[in-house]
Structure formats: structure tokens, C-alpha cells
Image: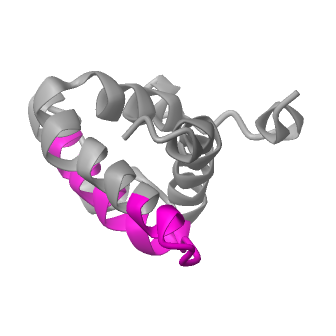
């Protein structure tokens, strides 16, 4: 069971009518351009740090990726909000924790 399952927040934006956190996570993983330019390199950098025995500050590595994803997502899908307005700090934290939780096993296994 994941910690996310205990979370009572749905992160659904009432103005947009969908869960922005889940949708943005899917966009980052499934958009080939974004994945190749931002997502994969970020995961590879985190894997390199882990191999060197250095601590991984997930927020430091992933927040710039999430910010760029938000910009890319808003422009690609004509979201009626500016990128800096789309996500709250709580939303960013949820995205970072979700991705880190999902990817950490593959990072440890050397998938990147």
C-alpha cells in the first residue's frame, strides 16, 4: 500500500474539472519530447548520485523538472491558467513524492 492511498486530497482543480497532479505526472511520463529532454535526464542524474553514494535531495532535482512540465503542459493543452498558477506548493510536493516513490526502485536497479 502506498502512502498516497492514505492521503485525503484528490488534487482536483474545480476550475479545470480533473486531477491536475495525476494528469501532469502522466504528461511527464508519456510526452516523448518532455520525457527525452527533462524526465529521463533528471532520473539519470539522481541515479548517478545514488551510485556515487551521495544523498539525493528529491526536491532540488525534481522541482525544476516539475516547473518546466507545468509550462509545457499548459502550452500544449491550452490550459486556461498560467503555469505558475496551475500548481500550489502542495501540488508540487505531491507530484515530487509520487514520481520519487514510483521511480526510486528503477533508479536503484540501474534502469536509467
Label count reads 0
Residue 26 image position (x, y, % from top left): 40, 25
Residue 82 appears in the figure: no
Q: Is residue 9 left or right of residue 83?
A: right
**Quadrant of the frame with the C terminus:** top left
x 43%, y 60%: residue:
46
Residue found at the very far front of the displayed protein: 52
In the visual, does 64 lie left or right of 5? left
Magenta residue span: 48-74
* Residue displayed at 61% across by 60% down: 90
**Quadrant of res 8:** top right
Q: Is residue 9 magenta?
A: no
Where residue 73 sits: x, y (%)? 22, 37
Secondary structure mostly seen in magenta is: helix
Q: Nearer the viewer, residue 15 or 75?
A: 75
Q: Is residue 14 left or right of residue 29?
A: right
Which of the pair 11/55 is nearer the observer?
55
Residue in the picture at 31% in, 28% down: 27
Q: Is residue 15 above or below residue 52?
A: above
Q: Classify 59 as above or below 93.
A: below
Q: Nearer the viewer, residue 9 or 49?
A: 49
The image's colour scheme reads one colour
Instruction: Tell me what residue is drawn at x 88 percent, y 27 percent.
Output: 1
Q: Is residue 70 magenta?
A: yes
Q: Is residue 108 left or right of residue 16?
A: right
Give residue 41's position: percent from left, percent from top: 25, 51
Q: Position of residue 98 (x, y in %)?
A: 60, 42
Q: Is residue 112 visible?
A: yes
Image: 53 above or below 51: below
Amino acid at each position: 500500500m502506498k502512502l498516497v492511498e492514505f492521503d485525503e486530497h484528490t488534487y482536483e482543480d474545480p476550475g479545470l474539472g480533473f486531477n491536475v497532479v495525476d494528469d501532469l505526472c502522466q504528461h511527464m511520463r508519456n510526452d516523448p519530447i518532455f520525457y527525452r529532454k527533462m524526465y529521463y535526464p533528471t532520473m539519470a542524474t539522481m541515479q548517478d548520485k545514488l551510485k556515487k553514494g551521495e544523498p539525493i535531495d528529491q526536491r532540488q532535482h525534481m522541482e525544476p523538472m516539475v516547473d518546466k512540465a507545468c509550462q509545457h503542459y499548459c502550452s500544449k493543452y491550452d490550459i486556461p491558467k498560467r503555469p505558475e498558477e496551475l500548481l500550489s506548493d502542495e501540488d508540487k510536493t505531491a507530484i515530487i513524492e509520487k514520481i520519487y516513490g514510483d521511480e526510486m526502485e528503477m533508479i536503484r536497479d540501474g534502469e536509467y
